[in-house]
Image (spheres, helix red, strand yellow):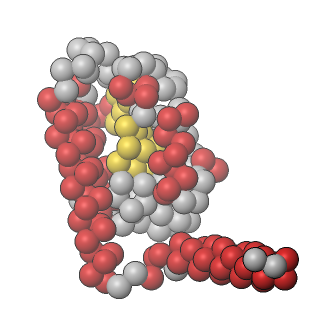
């Protein structure tokens, strides 16, 4: 192969790599505009995974008896990274026991698995809910996951409803009129 042929081949391969990278970036940006069938399938899959984790919490033998007495919900924009995928990557260094993403994903952090405190108060299970946006209610799938998680924790840890509150600066508006927004307690 002559030097000019090698140069053309390298230019061609370089152009191909650049074009594929740009295409991948455009696809990742346009992900929210998936066809409705794909969005529904993805939502159903996410919800099934969350339901599985919630069922596991209800029967988890590793939950320390009498360890948890309250639930604190966090939803401050300042804590938001903006992308659910970024949240999934940061759960391992998260100061929360659980993360609920705006797509209905549910992630358990290492502090839950080790049954160790994740903030103040130290006898509380701390849940971070990815904000829906300023003044917006949570999407129904997120509300379903959050309420399922809270119910499982209340049942498994014998936590009273009065011991569930939002952290300072967080207000979590629920849809469907099922409950008043959870305000700082």
Reply above or below: 142 against 111. Answer: below
Foreground pick, 32 / 118: 32
Reply above or below: 11 against 184. Answer: below
Reply above or below: 48 against 16. Answer: above
At horizontal 43% and vertical 28% (from top left) the residue drawn is 110
Total marks in image: 0
Position of the N terminus, as image quadrant, is bottom right
Quick check: can you spot residue 74? no
Q: Is residue 108 left or right of residue 77?
A: left
Q: Report which quarter residue 98 is drawn in.
A: top left
Q: Report which quarter residue 3 is drawn in.
A: bottom right
Position of the C terminus, as image quadrant, is top left
Quick check: can you spot residue 61? yes
Measured as percent of width and height from the top left, residue 7 is found at: 82, 78
Measured as percent of width and height from the top left, residue 156 is found at: 19, 28
Measured as percent of width and height from the top left, residue 134 is found at: 56, 65
At horizontal 42% and vertical 19% (from top left) the residue drawn is 116
Q: Is residue 171 left or right of residue 5?
A: left
Residue that protrudes farthest toward the right in the picture: 3
At horizontal 40% and vertical 50% (from top left) the residue drawn is 100
Foreground pick, 19 / 29: 19
């Amino acid at each position: 192969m002559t030097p000019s042929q090698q140069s053309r081949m390298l230019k061609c391969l370089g152009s191909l790599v650049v074009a594929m990278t740009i295409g991948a970036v455009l696809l990742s940006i346009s992900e929210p505009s998936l066809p409705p069938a794909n969005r529904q399938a993805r939502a159903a899959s996410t919800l099934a995974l969350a339901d599985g984790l919630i069922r596991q919490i209800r029967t988890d033998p590793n939950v320390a008896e009498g360890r948890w007495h309250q639930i604190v919900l966090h939803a401050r924009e300042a804590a938001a990274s903006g992308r659910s995928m970024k949240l999934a990557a940061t759960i391992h260094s998260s100061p929360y026991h659980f993360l609920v993403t705006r797509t209905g994903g549910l992630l358990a952090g290492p502090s839950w698995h080790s049954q160790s405190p994740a903030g103040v108060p130290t006898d509380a299970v701390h849940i971070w809910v990815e904000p829906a946006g300023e003044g917006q209610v949570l999407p129904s799938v997120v509300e379903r996951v959050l309420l399922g998680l809270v119910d499982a924790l209340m049942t498994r840890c014998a936590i009273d409803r009065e011991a569930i509150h939002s952290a300072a600066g967080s207000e979590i508006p629920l849809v469907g009129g099922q409950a008043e927004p959870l305000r700082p307690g």
